[in-house]
Amino acid sequence: MAAETGTPTTLTLKSNDDELFSVAESAAILSVTIRNMVEDGCAGGVIPLDNVDGKTLASVITYMNGISAIPADEEKKKSYRDKFLSDKDFETLADMVLAANYLNMSCLMDAVSAKIAQVMEKKSVGWVRRKFGIENDYTPEEEAAVKEEHKWTFEGVETDDDN
Amino acid sequence: MSLRRSYLSRRIIHRSFTLSNSHKSSKSTEIQSICREIEFDNNGGGFELAEDSNSISWAGMPPELLGEIIQRVEASEDKWPQRQNVVAFGCVCKRWRDATREAVEKSSLRQPGKITFPSSLKKQGPRDSPIQCLIKRDKKNATFYLYLSLTPSFMDKGKFLLAARKYRNGAHTEYIISLDADDLSQGSKAYVGKLRSDFLGTNFTIYDSQPPHSGAKPSSRSKSGRRVGSKQISPQIPSSNFEVGHVSYKFNLLKSRGPRRMLCSLTPPFSDEKFQTDKINRDNSENTKKLECPSVQECTTVLKNKAPRWHEHLECWCLNFHGRVTVASVKNFQLAATMVDQGGGKGGDGDETVVLQFGKVGVDTFTMDYRRPLSAFQAFAICLTSFGTKLACE
């Protein structure tokens, strides 16, 4: 735990491509992985994060700082999360999921999941496959059943095939 | 070409990243994306190309992380129409589908009876608060539509669940029940079952297109069809017809305009809990499963309608529908369950609990509220028996 009171403790995080980042401990402990390290007293030197690259870590730190600066107000936190993720592309979102998992940041995982659901809303299956780069591995029989299911689910909803 | 170069270098980064995470990346996907890349490149589709390169990390997303994401979506998109997003996840590919099924199954242990996939319509409803639905009648086309109520109002249509159309078949009447309001034939992929009545319109048999349990044999009357093969996909392949229930209306000899008396016997659909016990048993030992299954299958639900009370003051028959029925009609009914369990055990559970309530709220609008042990499909079929004149009853 932070020993001295008053002076904010700063942690140094290192990405897998050797970029170094300084973060206030109070923001960094949003990550349960980092919080455990701090509690175990092994966060003194540089904390290596082998599964996160510099670009993603920079983004995650922006998020940590942004969200921890907001006092306990769920509405404001939510709107910050929405704004934070609004300009992220598919690749970044995937990197965020991997980073949020590795760093054990439940609230970031929640936010990214909600964002993905929002992106997929009212889109055709083909659109989702194209955008997420996923191969259609159904047999023709399964594909027909899925189509039937999709039609039932989105009955009366215009699914958007383009853009 | 510079785009292409940057794409390739990006791909290499991705591959090493993928390896460092030590999860399997399917080779075929990679080859496919390279092919696609060339294709797009030839077409000069630079924008598509750049986008495509973005998404390799999604194709290689470890299943447990996919599960994490879908569980979160499942939990937050609790109600329709938002719940359609959960199904959208399940439509993408096999891995996404498995993760979605698992997330829905997990949550159904906490809250059984929720409607997510079309296959949910054949599962038992919730134990406590009933699922509220509306039935709209189209007299001109002899068609009935079942909607899931999204608001307490009787005016909002809600989420479409099932449709049924009445057909004359010789001396019999048949209601074909379908997932597709525009395709109400028995040969359709959307066909889920049917209701058949005798000449007098007092005895009905409910047929399910799918077997109610693994040992079920198709009804002799129906044509032999394909059996359902894949467990992964909710099987809506038009196949055989399995008898899953009977509804009969008792003769009413004393009074010409007295209340109807209904009797239903049903094979209860699989509940999610049962599914889970089966799964656990299968995991533990094959023997336990064999011991438990027969008693579950032999268990039949018997439903009787609650007898209305004669209201001296208003001079009519009355039932308490708790505000869900507003128009007096001979069609209105409440069914209460008594469990007949030959294997012993949970018999006599909640004798007077109303498990299905049906009644009129408008000229062509009716409410249908059902709960365990009925499924939406069974409840809808039972309600359909109430439409149409019963020659022997009135």
Image (cartoon, grey):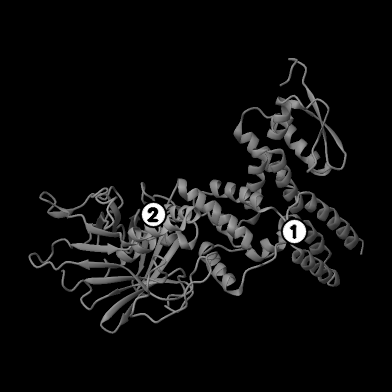
Residue positioned 85% across, 69% down in the render: B41
Amino acid on which disc 2 is placed: Gly
Q: Secondary structure at mark 2?
A: loop
Amino acid on which disc 1 is placed: Ser
Residue positioned 9% across, 64% down in the render: B255
Q: Quadrant of residue B97?
A: bottom right
Q: Quadrant of residue A3?
A: top right
Residue positioned 74% across, 62% down in the render: B26
Q: Which residue is mark 2?
A: B125
Percent position of residue B55, x then y: 75, 57
Q: Is residue B36 left or right of residue B67?
A: right
Callout 2: chain: B
Percent position of residue A120, x then y: 64, 56
Q: Is residue B159 left or right of residue B16?
A: left
Q: Which residue is mark 1?
A: B25
State the residue lying farthest toward the left.
Answer: B254
